[in-house]
Structure formats: C-alpha cells, structure tokens
Amino acid sequence: MSPHDTPRAPAAAAPTEATITPALPLLVVCLAAFSSLASMRACDALLPMLAAEFATTPGTAAQTVAAFAFAYGTVQFLVGPLGDRMGRLRVMAAACVLGSLANVAVLLATTLEAMTAARVLAGAASGGIVPMSLALIGDAVAFERRQQTLARLMLATHMGMIAGLWLGGMLGEALGWRAVFAALALGFAAVAVPLLRQASRAQAAPPAQPQGDRGGLVGALAGFVEVLREPWARWIVVLVGLEGALLFATLAFVPTFLHGTFGLTLGQAGAVMALYAAAGLVYAPLAGRLAQRLGERGQALGGACVIGVAAALLAVSRSWSWAVPACLLAGFGFFMLHSTLQLHATQMAPQRRSTGIALFVISLFGGQALGVALAAWLVDHGSVRAVFVLTAVTVPLIGLAFRHGLARHARGAISPARAPSSP
C-alpha cells in the first residue's frame, strides 16, 4: 500500500450479524451476485423469442428489460435503509427468495404484461443483492484486504452478465425461453438456503441501529441526508456517477460500432465485447498485489488511464481486431478504477453502510442512463467515434480527481478519515 494513501485508524469490531464465516463462505455471496446480474441480462438475447411468443415487436418486448432496470435502481431507496435497520444478511436472504419466486412468475407468464410485472419483482429482488453483498464485505473484511475481496465479487457480477447474455441465449434456443427463467429460479433458491440458515443464526444478535434512527420513511430519508452530509461521501457518489456516464456510454455502443463499421455479426460483436468482462479473470488474482504496489491513488489513476487508452484505440481503429485489445484494456482498467471506488463506498459512511452503498448504486445507474442517452444523441448527430474520443479524454480526469480528492481526504481537508471496520 502506498504510504501516501489514507491513514488507517485502529480497527473497530464488525457487527457479528454480518460476518462471513465458514458457514457463509464468500462463494455463496458471489453466487448470489452472479444470479442477480444473470437475471438482469437474461431477457437481452431472448427479445426475438419473446416478440414471437407474444405477437409483438422486439422493441415492445424490450419493456421487460426496462422494467427490471427501473425496479433495480429505485429499490435502492428501500433496501439501503432496510439493510442498516434489519441487517444486510436478512435483506439479502429475503431478496434471493423473492428472486426465485419472481423468476417462477416470469416463466409462468402467459401475456407480455404479466411477464413485465414479474420482471419488476425480479428487478427489485436483484437490487437487494449486490449492494448488500458490498455492505457484508465492508462489515466483515479488514480495509487493507477488502479491495481484493471486492474484485472477486466484481468478477462474479461480470460473469453473471455474460451468463445472462450468452448462456441465456443458448439455453433459450435449445429448450425455449421459459427454461432460462426456470434455471434462474433454481439458482436463486440454491443460494437462498445457506443465506437463510445463516440469517436465522444471526437473529440472536440483532444489528445495532444507527444513532438517532427514527425508522420508517422519515428515518430512511434522514439516513440518506446523513450520508450526503459527509463531503467525502458526496465526492465518491459524484465520481461513480461520472464513471457510469462516461464508461458505460462507450461500452453500450461498441457492438453497434463493430457491426456497422466492420460488418461483424451481432453475435461476433458481442463475443468481442465479452472480453471486457473476461478481463476480470486477469485482474482478480492480481488485485492484492496491485493494491500493495500502486496504492489506492495509483490504482484509480492507472485504471482510468488504461480506460482512456482503450477508448482511444477504438476511436482510431482501422480493423475490428483493434477492438480485441481495446475491450480487454477497458475491462482491466474498469476493474482497477471501480474496485477502488467500491472500496471507499463501503467505508464512506460506516454508521449507515447499506444506505451509503445504495446511494453509490443509484448514482452509478443514474449516470449510466444519462450517459447512454447523451451518447445516443452524439451518435445520431455525429459519430460513434466521437463518443470514444470523449471517453478517452474525460475518464482519465476522473482518476485524477479521485487521486487529488483522496490526498485531501487523507489530510482531513475533505472530511475526517473514519476508522475502517474489520472483524
């Protein structure tokens, strides 16, 4: 760890409710996150089948995707305060149970409207899993080791995205679209069992309530306000929103660029794009070493610059093959930058960790939605290469801003450094 990174105060004890013990290994948490993101992307490759099934257009069938994303984002206003009040493990276990039931409802749907309603429930369920996973890791893993653990969780979520896209499409073609949601229902049920078992053991030790917690809607809103009173929390929330807007706007148009410019099929373009997620297989085993060698500042700045190089490669590419190293670099840089932002999201408001992470997720998803909309306008009125150029120039500035902000945070110029919690 760089000597210039945030000073560490003596560690405080973590709540017993959230410890990841041998009875609840990290693998279970990662499998829950995997299922959550696989569910999110499950409909993407199935839209033509759904359109044929319900006698509509793929564009209309895409409401199943939009409904999930809307529910996933808006439920953060509920699951954040619930995680702080009831315990992250209980919320996560309940979300997995609801995820299983929601996917059963999807596979049984006989109309597009019924399927869309079930996808709303599935999105709300999945929205309670990854944020609670981050909070559990924040509670249970010492700050100095946390980034490597977060990298493994990120790898699980990215592999879930690939499974939802690729395996979902393959399973749908082989056995029909309902089989995809049957598999998801079974997956959620499988991870719900150990989570429920561990949550029942935790009932003897209820989570400590944040000081002054009034409960209800007023208490929830007060919790969000309390987190946002922290200047460092506001800084992290703004930076992750910018990251979502700039990076994911670029990624959203890579397959379209490869298809329209170089004539790749959408399947081939998707396979190239999947290298972005596969980069996590390279990053995960290196995360601890990189954290020690580069420190938090170096990782964030280095990751942002790597993303900038990847976007520049896409902007000047003369062949589709240039996208292969570009997608790998973009994925590796994203893991470096985002895992560092996630690390501080778990620590920016330890007294309301679930609420703080919920704000982090809201900002990330809101940034993505805004960034993709603005990028779409730029593509329609200019070119997709202009989007790549914008990303190449601006994402490194996020790394610089984080590096500068972390230096000020370490000196107490932004907000007093908080004691990282560890088991």
Image (cartoon, rainbow, N blue to C red):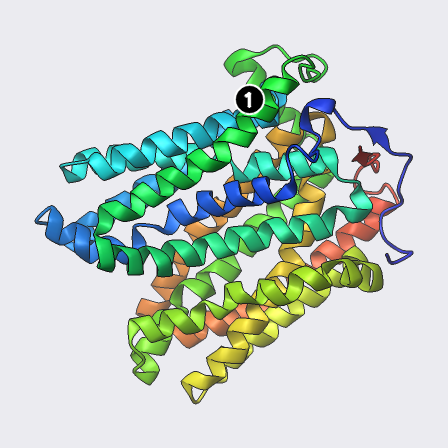
The picture places residue 241, in percent across and down from the top left corner, at 55, 49
Residue 134 as seen in the image, left or right of residue 413: left
Residue located 33% across and 82% down the image: 261
x and y, in percent, of residue 17 in the image: 68, 23
Q: Quadrant of the N terminus?
A: bottom right
Label 1, on which residue? 82
Q: Amino acid at mark 1?
A: Leu
Q: Is residue 311 visible?
A: no
Q: Which quadrant of the view contains residue 113?
A: top left
Q: Few, some or many C-alpha atoms within 10 Å of disc 1 (few <14, some 14-19, many ≥20)?
A: many
Most distant residue in the bottom direction: 318
Residue 255's place in the image compared with 107, above or below, is below
Q: Residue at x 66, y 70 (%)?
A: 305
Q: Quadrant of residue 259?
A: bottom left
Q: Say which of 120 and 223 sits in front.
A: 120
Q: Secondary structure at mark 1?
A: helix
Residue 387 in view here: yes
Vertical position of residue 209 compared to residue 105: above or below: above
Task: In this rendered view, identify the residue nearer to me: 244 or 135.
Answer: 135
Farthest left residue in view: 55
| Residue 402 locus on image (x, y percent) | 72, 54
Where residue 229 sits, quadrant-wise, is top right
Q: Check the image and report above or below for 75 versus 210.
A: below
Residue at 63% over, 19% down:
201
Specify whether 243 is left or right of 257: right
Does 97 sit above or below residue 371? above
Q: Position of residue 183 (x, y in %)?
A: 35, 44
User: Measuring 32% from the left and 71% from the top, which residue is drawn there?
Assistant: 267
Image quadrant containing the C terminus:
top right
